[in-house]
Amino acid sequence: MVGFTSNAQSISAGLSGGLPSGDASDLYTFAVILDASVHFEAGDSFMVGGTAGYINSFGDELDLGGFGSVEVEDAGFIPVAASARYMISEAFSLGADVGYALGVSPDTNDGGFYYAPKAIYNVSENFGIVAAYRGVSVDGGSFDFLSLGFEFKFN
C-alpha cells in the first residue's frame, strides 16, 4: 500500500506573456498564458502537484511578396501537467511542469507533449515572478517560447 500525507498546500494562479522561439517564431508573434496550480508539501523544500491552463499564441501576418499576404490563425493549447517545485531559499525556487497540451485551435492542432522548466522569485508570501521556457512537441516540430509573468498564491 502506498500512502501520501500532506501538511501544507499552495494554490496559485498566474498570467504570463511569451515570445516564440524555434519553429513557432516564424508564424507567431506573442503568447498569453493563464494557469492555475495546486502543490502539496512532499518534503522540507519540495512540493508536488498539478497544473492546468490556457495558452493563446497570436498568429503573424506573412508577406508573400507579389502574391499579397496571409494571416496565420492563432494557436491555442490547454496544458494539463504534473508539477514540481524545489525551494532553494525563501525567495527563490525552481520547478518543472510535464504533461500534455490539448490542441484547441486551429482545427489541425492536435496538441502534444508539454514541458515547462521554471524559475520563480517570490516577491512576497503571496506574489511571485515566474520565468519559464515552455514547449509543446507537436507533429512535425515544436511550439516553444520564453515567458515571463507573475503568480498569485492563495495560501
Image (spheres, rainbow, N blue to C red):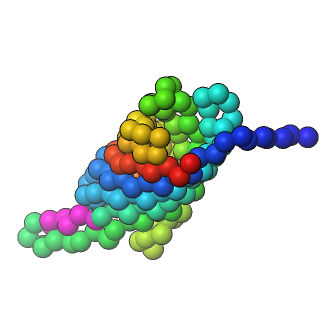
Looking at the picture, tell me which residue is in the foreground, 23 or 2: 2
Residue range of the region highlighted in magenta in the rendering: 59-64
Question: Which residue: 36% across, 53% down?
Answer: 16
Q: Quadrant of residue 15?
A: bottom left
Q: x, y percentage for residue 6? A: 73, 41
Magenta stretch, overall SS:
strand
Left or right: 24 as drawn, with respect to 41:
left
Q: How many marks?
A: 0
Residue 142 is at least partly visible in this image: no
Question: Which residue: 91% across, 40% down?
Answer: 1
Farthest residue to the right: give it.
1
Q: x, y percentage for residue 64? A: 15, 66
Looking at the picture, tell me which residue is in the foreground, 140 or 7: 7
Q: Quadrant of residue 85?
A: top right
**Residue 135 drawn above or below residue 32:** above
Q: x, y percentage for residue 148? A: 34, 46
- Residue 63 magenta-highlighted: yes
**Residue 109 drawn above or below residue 89:** below
Left or right: 8 as drawn, with respect to 54:
right
Left or right: 7 as drawn, with respect to 14:
right
Left or right: 134 as drawn, with respect to 45:
left
Farthest residue to the left: give it.
66
Q: x, y percentage for residue 62? A: 19, 65
- Residue 115 magenta-highlighted: no
Residue 55 is at least partly visible in this image: yes
